[in-house]
Amino acid sequence: MADTTPGTMMEQLLAVEPAIVIGAGAAGLAVARALMKAGVATVVLEKESRLAEPWRRRHEQLHLNTHRDLSALPGLAYPKGTPAFPHRDVVIRHMNDFHEANRLPVEFGVSVEAIMSGGDHWIVRTSAGSRLARHVVVAT
């Protein structure tokens, strides 16, 4: 007899993705790059419509409060001549450059509503429907 408990039939229709990263900020982008370099197919889910939206919403005079050398994303230094504590626009550009250079698969406008254990995988309920993943990284 087939198992027809709620969620089970839906799960049978969805493929289990290797990894989902939640959040396309600096941490999410860096971990997605690391996973992909390790050969783990990864998708990044970002609720905003573009990268670095929280940086864009902050005040115009905002600067990074850690030194640029300690805050650069992996494999991408800030450009020569960047001040020690970069302005928010430079940080935004850095995140966009990193995203493009590494061709990271970010799905914009997708918010995560719940994460539940599905036994040997995770069920990630999003604003765009449910997804299944072997691994989930919450980088928000």
Image (spheres, helix red, strand yellow):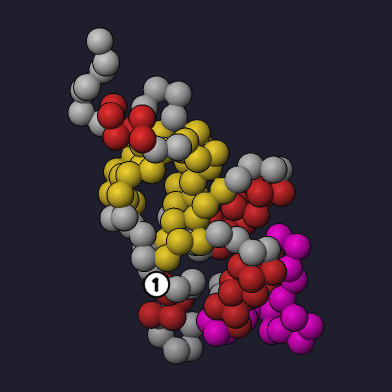
Using a 10 Å C-alpha cutoff, classify the residue at mark 1 as few (fewer than 14 neighbours), some (14 to 19) or many (20 or more): few
Q: Which residue is mark 1?
A: 49
Can the viewer see residue 91 in this picture? no
Given residues 120 and 12, the one toward you in this image is: 12
Query: Which picture quadrant has residue 120?
Result: top left
Picture residue at 39% right of the left edge, 22% below the top: 119
Q: Which residues are magenta?
A: 73-89
From this view, report whether residue 19 is shown above or below residue 140.
above
From this view, report whether residue 73 is shown above or below residue 19.
below
Picture residue at 31% right of the left edge, 55% below the top: 128
The three-letter amino acid code for the residue at tag 1 is: Ser
Can the viewer see residue 42 in this picture? yes
- Measured as percent of width and height from the top left, residue 85 is found at 63, 79
List the single residue furthest toward the right: 80
Disc 1 on helix, strand or loop? loop
Location of the N terminus by quadrant is top left
- Measured as percent of width and height from the top left, residue 138 is found at 45, 47
Query: Which picture quadrant has residue 111?
Result: bottom left
Q: Main secondary structure of the magenta part?
A: loop
- Measured as percent of width and height from the top left, residue 65 is found at 56, 72
